[in-house]
Amino acid sequence: MDVSNGAYGLALRSQDIAKIAFLYLNNGKWAGDTVVSEDWVRQSTRPIVKTGETMECLQSYGYLWWVGTIGKYSSFLELGMADR
């Protein structure tokens, strides 16, 4: 069985990534059920470390999320690469 450390090396389909985004945009709820606590969503997407990046959306890092701003909006995002 292959095990990933979670920070990299995951092989996810676009649909799976969209589900994670939907879960976080709904404060950890899926179809009315709490899958991830709202507190964890809030804590994991807050800035923990300043990165020194020049792009506004990448200036801080949370718990596996890039945290910053896009224009006047607070943002959190994940980055990845296609392996095809």
Image (cartoon, helix red, strand yellow):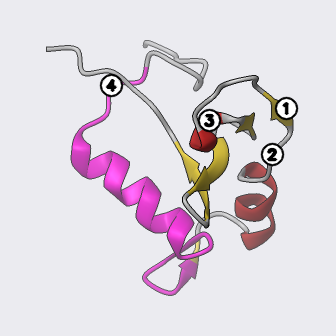
Q: Mark 3, mark 2: which one is toward the viewer?
A: 3
Segment tinted magenta in the rendering: 10-33
Quadrant housing the N terminus? top left
Q: Is residue 57 left or right of residue 44?
A: left
Q: Mark 1, mark 4: which one is toward the viewer?
A: 1
Q: Residue furthest bottom?
A: 32
Which residue position holds label 4?
A: 11
Quadrant housing the C terminus? top left
Which is more toward the observer, 51 or 19? Answer: 51
Residue 13 is situated, as x and y percent measured from the top left of the image, at 24, 38
What label sits on residue 80 in the rendered view? none
Q: Residues within 10 Å of mark 3 (few under 14, many from 20)?
A: many
Residue 13 within the segment the image draws in magenta: yes
Element under disc 2? loop
Tell me which numbered mark, 3 or 4, is placed earlier along the sequence.
Answer: 4
Q: Amino acid at mark 4?
A: Ala
- Mark 2 near mark 1, Cβ–Cβ under 8 Å? yes
How far apart marks 3 and 1 lie (CA) works out to: 11 Å
Vertical relation: 60 (above or below) 83: below
How far apart marks 1 and 4 lie (CA) works out to: 26 Å
Q: Residue furthest left?
A: 84
Residue 66 is situated, as x and y percent measured from the top left of the image, at 63, 39
How far apart marks 2 and 4 lie (CA) works out to: 26 Å
Which residue position holds label 3?
A: 58
How far apart marks 3 and 2 lie (CA) works out to: 10 Å
Q: Residues within 10 Å of mark 2 (few under 14, many from 20)?
A: some
How far apart marks 3 and 4 lie (CA) works out to: 23 Å
Which residue position holds label 2?
A: 47
Which residue position holds label 1?
A: 49
Tell me which numbered mark, 1 or 4, is placed earlier along the sequence.
Answer: 4
